Amino acid sequence: MKVYTVVITGASGSVYGLRLVEQLLLAGGAVTVIATQAGSEVMAFETGFSMPGPDEEEQLLRYLEIDRDDAHLRIARDTDLFDAIASGSRRVDGMVVAPASMGYCGALAAGLGATLSQRAADVQIKERRPLIVVPRETPLSLVHLRNLTALAEAGAQVLPASPGFYGRPETLDDAVNFVVGKVLDQLGVENALFRRWRE
């Protein structure tokens, strides 16, 4: 079973992270979810859903409409630096930060590791394991671009939340699915979330 970490930061677009968690669980993956404090607040504002705490995973499963018996979901607190994913000895097949705020990207580019979500991403980089960062900001300042460049140079993949329109999306879900489908492609997870070019 593949093991994944999904981080939801305070950038607008928490639906990207939630849809990704849903799809990874449906694909049979084991998923650890971390929402930063700002990520939790933005999620509640944008979706009306408040991220539950550890040992309350069934609330998130119900929100995602996933059968609890078939899911391997864990919620971790961003303040818990003793969590297993803070260590390089813990195998994680892929980590995605979706959406990734520019503040989070800046902290990660500086190697701060002050929170669990930052430390887990730092571990992915140092262990040369997949780390996908989905920035959701526009326009990008030179500081933002330099931080994203530093992450790319360190081995992270920068995958902007930029939906394509050649598939002729008809709903907001279609646009969200395009971005999440591209993330799943990079993780090697089969999906049919979006219409591919010339299909």
Image (spheres, rainbow, N blue to C red):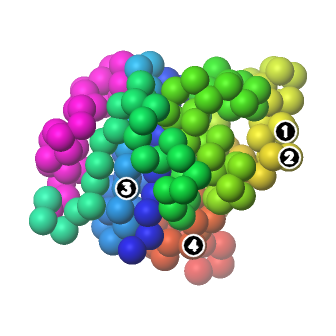
Residue 66 lies left or right of residue 30; in this view the side is: left
Hey, what amino acid is under mark 3?
A: Val
- Whether the residues at callouts 2 and 1 have beta carbons within 8 Å, the answer is yes
Q: Position of residue 87 (x, y in %)?
A: 53, 47
**Amino acid at circle 1:** Thr
Residue 59 appears in the figure? yes
Do the residues bearing badges 4 and 1 touch, measured as CB atoms within 8 Å? Answer: no
- Say which residue appears at 44% left-offset and 63% top-offset: 3
Q: Is residue 81 above or below residue 173?
A: above
Which residue is the site of mark 1?
Answer: 149
Residue located beneath label 3 in the image: 31
Q: Which residue is mark 2?
A: 153
Q: Residue at x 35, y 31 (%)?
A: 77
Q: Nearer the viewer, residue 7 or 158?
A: 7
Most extreme residue toward the bottom is: 199
Up-down relation of residue 39 to residue 66 (above or below): above
Q: Nearer the viewer, residue 166 or 113?
A: 113
Asked if the residues shown at circle 3 and circle 1 are in contact, with their CB atoms under 8 angstroms apart, the answer is no
Residue 173 visible, this angle? no
